[in-house]
Image (tube, rainbow, N blue to C red):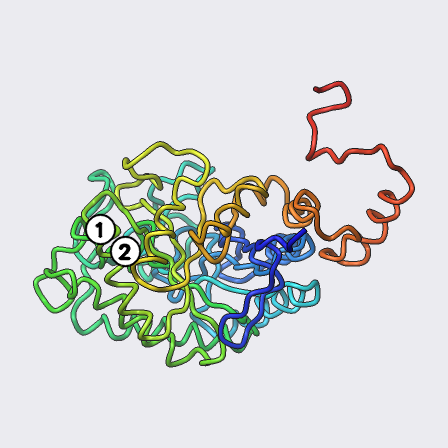
Amino acid sequence: MAQPMLFEPISIRDVTLKNRVVVAPMHQYAAEKGFATDWHLMNAGRYAAGGAGLVIMESTKVERRGCGTVGDLGLWDDAFVPGLKRCVDFIREHGAVAGIQLGHSGRKARRYRPWEGGAPLKPSAEVDDWEAWELVSSSAINAPPTDPTPRALTRAEIPEVVERWGQAARRAHEAGFEVLDIHGAHGYLIHQFLSPFSNVRNDEYGGSELNRMRFAIEVVESVRAHWPASKPLFLRLSVEDDSGWGPDQSVALAKIVKSKGVDVIDCSSGGMRGAPVVSTGPVTYGYQVPYAERLKKDAGIMTMAVGLIVHADQAEQILQQGRADLIALARELLYNPNWPMDAARKLGVDKSFALVPPPQAYWLAKRAQSVKDVTPSTYMKGLNAG
């Protein structure tokens, strides 16, 4: 049997992933004043131990104003580096490549955690720098209309914000991360510049599509200037935001940033008008894969597919059909952090459980060798299920 593509190594620049399973960045809202906690070590570590090739830690903010909640990770100061390095070292020790996403929430900042309702925060004793945690955006437009109105960044401020992305990239390198993903999707600051729904500027950062792309392009340039040429750079886009930014614009931007040093487009959608899903089709298995396929084909760039990719054979088929180069999972990995190991078994590889660390592999292999009639729980509903 040929080796499944899902478990073929892939090299991007000087970094080689042992397989094409990627842990998509997932906000945890568990930081303490921007600092990583034991939760982050555990959360990233369990995915590395589960066999993923690349573990991308959550959107980590490039400045204080960019924090979405009181629990956002930060990388706007050198003081944050040691806590993140601890996570990097653990990820690497267990056989995965460590990545990080850098983001800025823009007008979607200063909110309660999602499970606390997600509404705009109100001043309280819990936040001791309320005035510094300012809502800024490409334009003074709020969405939904009940949200506070952000302040439009001035022309003079924009280079300062761009440079903060570059400095955060420098710190990410110092922490030991090997892959960096710029968050330009889901209605956050870069996306707020890209979309005509949120950007009504009349200077060189607004108006035409190319002008609206300018901020994103400058962020890429700043990050690349501080991020080693040997390390891969990803850019996450809402390829379709259902608000005036779509696949044609995403292809055009992808072609530009490819020449600036972006290696992979992380293809998502939505987020501009509050919902993470667009109205262009039903939300079902692999509903965002067509975006990855379109950018790979028309922009000539590597892509990462994400969005209700749940099953091993589904992921393998996406790769076999040439629709994407990498497969990213998020909530399915929350459900089963050992998904890569499980997928490898279902696709007929890794009979010795070599994908996971020895404390797991030894006992799982021992059970498989000594008990022939045990079916893992991920293969069936129960002992009496058909």
User: What residue is pinned by disc 2?
Assistant: 191
User: In percent of the image, x 21 and y 53: which residue is there?
Assistant: 195
Cα distance in 3D space between marks 2 and 1: 9 Å
Kindly identify the amino acid type of the residue bearing the numbered disc 2.
His
Q: Answer left or right for 289 relative to 313.
A: left
Residue that appears at 57% across and 42% down: 313
Q: What is the crowding at mark 2: few (fewer than 14 residues within 10 Å), some, or many (at least 20)?
A: many
Which amino acid type corresponds to the residue marked 1 in the rendered image?
A: Trp
Q: Quadrant of the C terminus?
A: top right
Residue 246, image x and y in percent? 24, 50
> Do the residues bearing badges 2 and 1 touch, measured as CB atoms within 8 Å?
yes
Judge left or right: residue 20 versus residue 273.
right
Residue farthest to the front, as pictured = 1
Can I make out residue 116 in this image? yes
Task: Relative to 272, say whether 65 is above or below.
Answer: below
| Residue labelled with disc 1 | 245
Q: Is residue 72 left or right of residue 86?
A: left
Is 208 in front, or is 58?
208
* Quarter of the view holding residue 257: bottom left
| Residue 370 x, y percent position in the rendering | 92, 42
SS under mark 1: loop
Pick whichever, 261 or 318, lies toward us. 318
- In front: label 2 or label 1: 1
Image-quadrant location for residue 85: bottom right
